[in-house]
């Protein structure tokens, strides 16, 4: 899992049927200090997150497909939780 910040959302006119009703968000990976680390990527939202939220993103394909309950879903990552608080000793 990766700690990320939601920085936007995606609107599509056509999409793979498996995504029907799913929100697709743009997320920015974060380091332990909550500063941006790496490039943004797309992730399907399962927790009703929105821009500005700190979230947990599952980037392992099989785990992502399990949330869709479809082993053939073309999914790379999903937002699996919204973070309430981050405590670090870094």
Image: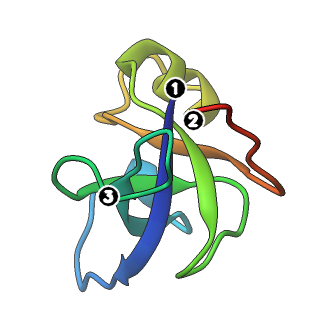
Please tell me how crowded label 3 is: few (under 14), some (14-19), or many (20+) other residues with Cα within 10 Å: some
**Mark 1 vs mark 3: which is more N-terminal?**
1
> Is residue 64 shown left or right of residue 7?
right
On the image, the x and y values in percent for residue 53 come to: 62, 71
For this orientation, the residue located farthest to the left is 39
Which quarter of the rendered picture does the C terminus lie within?
A: top right
Residue bearing mark 1: 1
Please tell me how crowded label 2 is: few (under 14), some (14-19), or many (20+) other residues with Cα within 10 Å: some
Residue bearing mark 2: 68
In this view, the residue in front, 67 or 84, is 84
The quarter of the picture where residue 28 lies is: bottom left
Question: Alpha-carbon distance for marks 1 and 3?
Answer: 16 Å
Relative height, residue 41 to residue 24 (above, below) = above
Relative height, residue 8 to residue 22 (above, below) = below
On the image, the x and y values in percent for residue 13 come to: 24, 86
On the image, the x and y values in percent for residue 9 come to: 39, 80
Foreground tag (1 vs 2): 1
In this view, the residue in front, 46 or 50, is 50
Question: Alpha-carbon distance for marks 3 and 2?
Answer: 28 Å
Residue bearing mark 3: 36
On the image, the x and y values in percent for residue 73 come to: 37, 31
Q: Secondary structure at mark 3?
A: loop
**Mark 3 vs mark 2: which is more N-terminal?**
3
Please tell me how crowded label 1 is: few (under 14), some (14-19), or many (20+) other residues with Cα within 10 Å: few
């Amino acid at each position: 899992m990766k700690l990320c910040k939601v920085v936007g959302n995606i609107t599509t006119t056509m999409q793979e049927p498996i995504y029907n009703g799913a929100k697709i968000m743009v997320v920015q990976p974060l380091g332990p200090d909550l500063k941006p680390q790496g490039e943004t990527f797309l992730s399907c939202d399962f927790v009703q997150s929105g821009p500005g939220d700190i979230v947990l993103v599952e980037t392992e394909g099989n785990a992502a497909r399990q949330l869709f309950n479809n082993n053939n879903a073309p999914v790379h990552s999903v937002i699996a939780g919204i973070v309430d608080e981050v405590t670090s000793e870094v």
